[in-house]
């Protein structure tokens, strides 16, 4: 079960929070699902690391580069054909904001990722019998970036 949730405070200028978590209804998550989800988590980590390293170094980073890092991890694990959409999107007062998207698939987003902005990293794999996705929000600071909530590391079992 894929749970994609987004909401914001009922206040002027509130910013969205947008996450996806995975759950499994049953006793034991099948091995292919566990493996695919581990690949998605590794891809998410590759994207976070790239952004944090670039911000720490003061290097200009563009949206397509984050998509390339995330997709590159997925491809290196043999799941490249199972990617169906970009890595992420800008988040702001609208759930899909107007800043840089993490995209080198649907478009080639060359807009820079700038401090004091937020975006999603949401790698997903869509296989013939199931799909997996993990989504976090990354807030970019002057020389760092931080995940704004809890990161899922395994399926929730229902």
Image: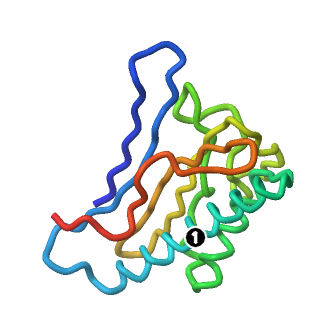
- Rendered location of residue 46, percent (x, y): 63, 69
Residue 9: which quarter of the image? top left
Q: Nearer the viewer, residue 26 or 147?
A: 147
Taking the image as shown, residue 149 lies to the left or right of residue 100, namely: left
User: Circle 1 is placed at which residue position?
Assistant: 43
The chosen color scheme is: rainbow
In this rendering, the answer to whether 53 lies above or below 77 is above
Q: Nearer the viewer, residue 153 or 22?
A: 153
Residue at the outermost top position: 12
Could you say where residue 8 lies in the image, as x and y percent from the top left?
42, 28
Give how far across and how far down residue 137 sits, in percent.
53, 47
Q: Residue at x 65, y 69 (%)?
A: 71
Query: Residue at (41%, 38%) from the top-left corner?
Result: 6
Q: x, y percentage for residue 10?
A: 39, 18
Q: Is residue 62 left or right of residue 98?
A: right
Q: Residue at x 50, y 13 (%)?
A: 12
Task: Give the quarter of the figure containing the C terminus.
Answer: bottom left
Where, quadrant-wise, is the N terminus in this rendering?
Answer: bottom left
């Amino acid at each position: 079960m894929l749970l994609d949730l987004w909401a914001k405070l009922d206040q002027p200028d509130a910013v969205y929070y947008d996450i996806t978590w995975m759950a499994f209804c049953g006793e034991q998550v099948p091995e292919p699902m566990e493996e695919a989800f581990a690949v998605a988590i590794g891809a998410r980590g590759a994207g976070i690391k790239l952004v944090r390293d670039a911000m720490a170094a003061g290097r200009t980073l563009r949206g397509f580069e984050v998509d390339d890092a995330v997709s590159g991890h997925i491809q290196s694990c043999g799941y490249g054909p199972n990617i169906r959409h970009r890595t992420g999107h800008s988040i702001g007062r609208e759930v899909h904001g107007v800043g840089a998207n993490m995209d080198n698939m649907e478009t080639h987003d060359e807009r820079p990722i700038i401090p004091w902005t937020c975006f999603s990293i949401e790698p997903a794999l869509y296989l013939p019998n199931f799909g997996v996705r993990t989504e976090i929000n990354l807030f970019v600071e002057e020389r760092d970036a931080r995940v704004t909530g809890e990161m899922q590391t395994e399926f929730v079992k229902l």
